[in-house]
Amino acid sequence: MANRPLSPHLQIWRWGPAMFVSILHRVTGNGLAVVGLATLLCWLAALAGGPEAYAKFSAMAGSWYGLVVLVGLSWAFFTHLMSGLRHFVLDVGAGYELTINKVWSVLAPIFAILLTAAFWAALKLF
């Protein structure tokens, strides 16, 4: 018997935007679940801990590393959202043409970055 994979493997497939967006969708989903849950629990614990604990949490969230986490979470949310909308359109049965699929695979992360920037710009206004 030949020593070869039984099904197509990453050595056979060329990397493309659709593969990247699909993997990014999984990574951002897991990141939102783990980091988002940890951030939510820290925030809830600070709320339950009283004004001193909440002030400590606010200081940490407002620091450079806290903002990196919060901006990263919002970027992961919008990336996951855009990729999820792309997958929803594919589930409906549209967008399977190679050119259209490639265009939407490239645009999904770009829209996510723009939405993240708009979200943080809107937060700075209020």
Image (cartoon, helix red, strand yellow):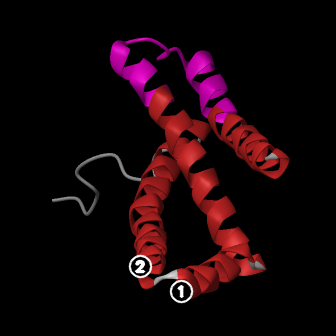
Q: Which numbered disc covers residue 121?
A: none
Please tell me whether mark 1 sits on a helix, a strand or a loop: helix
Can you say which quadrant of the picture contains the N terminus? bottom left
For label 2, the residue is: 45
Q: Is residue 75 left or right of residue 63?
A: left
Badge 1 or badge 2: first in the primary sequence: 2
Q: Is residue 83 left or right of residue 92?
A: right
For label 1, the residue is: 53
Q: Is residue 91 left or right of residue 13?
A: left
Q: Is residue 113 left or right of residue 89?
A: right
The amino acid beneath tag 1 is Ala
Q: Evaluate whether residue 44 shows in this view.
A: yes
Between residues 119 and 89, which one lies in front from this camera angle?
Answer: 119
Residue 40 picture location, percent across and down? 44, 67
Residue 105 quadrant:
top right
Q: Is residue 89 magenta?
A: yes
| Image: magenta residue range | 86-107
Give the dominant element type of the magenta stretch: helix, strand or loop.
helix
Q: Residue at x 66, y 41 (%)?
A: 112
Q: Residues within 10 Å of mark 2 (few under 14, many from 20)?
A: some
Between residues 22 and 36, which one lies in front from this camera angle?
Answer: 36
Residue 34 quadrant:
bottom left
Residue 44 picture location, percent across and down? 42, 71
Q: Residue at x 66, y 24 (%)?
A: 103
Please tell me whether mark 2 sits on a helix, a strand or a loop: helix
Q: Is residue 79 above or below residue 3?
A: above
Q: Is residue 2 magenta?
A: no
Residue 99 picture location, percent across and down? 62, 18
